[in-house]
Amino acid sequence: MGRQPQPGTVQVRRHLLAILADVDESMSTPDVLVAISRRAGCNVPESAPVCRFAGDPRGSCLAWCWHQPVYPQLRAMAKLGLVQRIRIPDHRCVYWQRVDNETDEAMNELFDQNTAEVAGTGPAGDSDQVRALYRERAHLVAALVRAAVLDVGRDAVIAYNDPDEPRLPVLYADTDAGQISWHINPEDLPLFAAVPVVDPGDPRARWDGHDKQTALTRLRTLAAGQSRGPRAVPGQFGRR
């Protein structure tokens, strides 16, 4: 039998379904965060002396305090077929839309028990098993960045500039085969001590538009010892 979700989790799920039901088109993750903050208020604990996002240079509240409870629930609802996860070309954000043909079984699962994707997660929303795999990957990425990027005079930087994952740093590596980027769990940052953390708008942290398949192709090119030739200039700022 699955564990019963906490009342706060159920409330977040109900808010999300209601928010997505109120709009005719899909909503980006940042828009969902703002919408739930308007319905439920600030998510900063009352014990906190001040909102840690209050100093955002853009001046307005982006409701990032809601990201950690909201994003895993959106993914869980997508897994259950209650919402659809949409990626729009040339848009940095993931978009979400409520599905019309939701089933009673899916609704019962959403409100009656935690799914494996949501239960027992860490800072990045990962289960312990997934966390161990990402930790292993982080060691490999750190070695690759040192050998194939920094040691050959190319740039590698870390920036917090993914609007869908504002708490997760993104590593951008300019390799001989083209730019490759990864999300890094904050717990793994010590493995990347040689990589500077830069402002979100730093030119070296501009996503060049590559998708996962392109990144894998570039990795295979590196493994084969091939080169793309002269160093490329990153494209317009964006992510995913």
Image: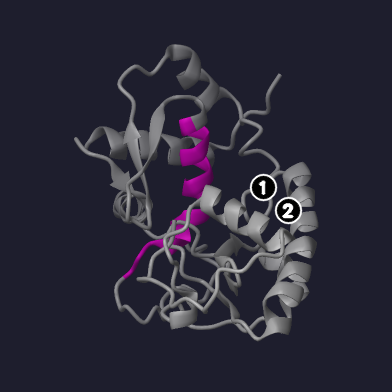
Is residue 18 shown in magenta? Answer: no
Q: Identify the amino acid type marked 1.
A: Asp
Is residue 66 shown in magenta? Answer: yes
Image quadrant holding the N terminus, namely: top right
Residue 222, position in %: x, y?
68, 63
Image quadrant holding the C terminus, namely: bottom left
Residue 126 seen in render: yes
Residue 117, position in %: x, y?
62, 37
Q: Which residues are magenta?
A: 61-78
Query: Which residue is tagged 2?
Result: 134
Element assignment for label 2: helix
Residue at figure coordinates x 59%, y 61% from the top left: 183
Q: Earlier in the sequence, mark 1 or mark 2?
A: 1
47 or 98, which is in the foreground?
98
Residue at figure coordinates x 62%, y 84% from the top left: 196
Residue 139, position in %: x, y?
79, 63
Q: Identify the amino acid type marked 2.
A: Tyr
Say if mark 1 contacts mark 2, CB within 8 Å: yes
Count neighbours of disc 1 (C-alpha within 10 A) and say few if under 14, some if 14 to 19, many if 20 or more.
Answer: some
Q: Nearer the viewer, mark 1 or mark 2?
A: 2
For the residues labelled 1 and 2, the Cα–Cα distance comes to 9 Å
Where, by quadrant of the figure, is residue 92 drawn? bottom left
In the drawing, what numbered circle is on residue 126?
Answer: 1
